[in-house]
Image (cartoon, grey):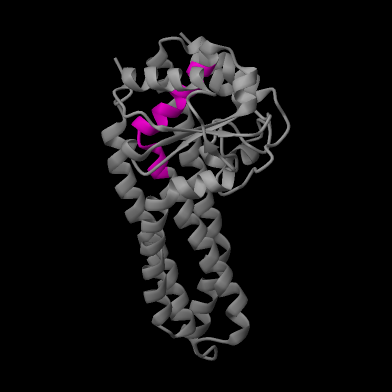
Amino acid sequence: MATLYTHKSQNIVKTWFLMAGFLVFVILIGWIFAQAYGNPFILYAAVFFSIFMNITGYWFSDKIALRMAGAIPARREEYFNLYTIVENLSITAGLPMPKVYVMNDIAPNAFATGRNPEHAVIAVTTGLLTMLEKAELEGVIAHELSHIGNRDMLIGTVAVVLAGFIAILSDFFMRSMMWGGRDRDSKAGVAFMILGVVAVILAPIAATLIRLAISRRREYLADTSGALLTRYPEGLASALKKIGGYSMPMKRASDATAHLFISNPFGATGTKKFLTRMFMTHPPMEDRIKVLLTK
């Protein structure tokens, strides 16, 4: 039978492949731009900044996400029930007790972040604590602990940081086209300039689609792992139904951290259109509930 750790080793390997793959992608884009401008410095700069942003995103991901979400440390005396649930489920999962934070927001939501289980954080909104029953809250916390145990946080951080960098690099190329580049009278100059324009258009889209696909797949895995942890999938399914029924966005919703949350912080979408779903950070809530309740 699958356990919380079934996909842990696979995810670690996937993380390194993801990091390497994105680095190669960045290098390729940098090489195209360097050829288009006849300046090898662009390639060196692309490699340096991709490595730098990887390290920065890995080391400071929790602090960045907490600050952007407006999360503050939750005092045990004030949030005793929340602390007890996190502590008990952490022991059950065999994970270190994560730090617990609270976001003052009526929208029900939660997220986990941190570079590894030893430096993990779980943050929940006050709206979530008010809306959910104990079994439902346990399901949500189990979901977030599953992200920690499965090392999903690192995968998501790397994907977001590098996808964002590719978008910045493409934007820089597009804005600087007016400055000129390689000799455009030569066939090579024209070819690389055309290739550069194509890369500017397609690279950010491809990087974004990869990032969003990873995010959706990780949510399904965390739902399943969380249900296995509590042995009560109905609790998480009920919580998702309540969370999905709340349509108002969070006060500090951000595209940069949307993938971290258990539900889209911009509010429910509820669409089944294929093209739209490709650009969603989360799977449709009804699909997640159906998977949980399938015997």
Q: Residue at x 67, y 37 (%)?
A: 250
Q: Residue at x 54, y 88 (%)?
A: 184
On the image, the x and y values in percent for residue 81 come to: 50, 17
Seen in the picture, residue 147 relative to 257 is either above or below; the reply is above
Question: Is 251 contained in the magenta span?
Answer: no
Question: Is 148 contained in the magenta span?
Answer: yes
Q: Is residue 11 in view?
A: yes
Q: Residue at x 62, y 27 (%)?
A: 126
On the image, the x and y values in percent for residue 284 come to: 60, 28
Q: Quadrant of the N terminus?
A: top left
Q: Quadrant of the C terminus?
A: top left
Q: Residue at x 54, y 61 (%)?
A: 167
Q: Where are the magenta residues, as a range?
A: 137-155
In this orientation, which residue lies closer to the viewer: 119 or 212?
119
Seen in the picture, residue 63 relative to 245 is either above or below; the reply is below
In this orientation, which residue lies closer to the viewer: 99 or 20?
99
Q: Residue furthest front?
A: 77
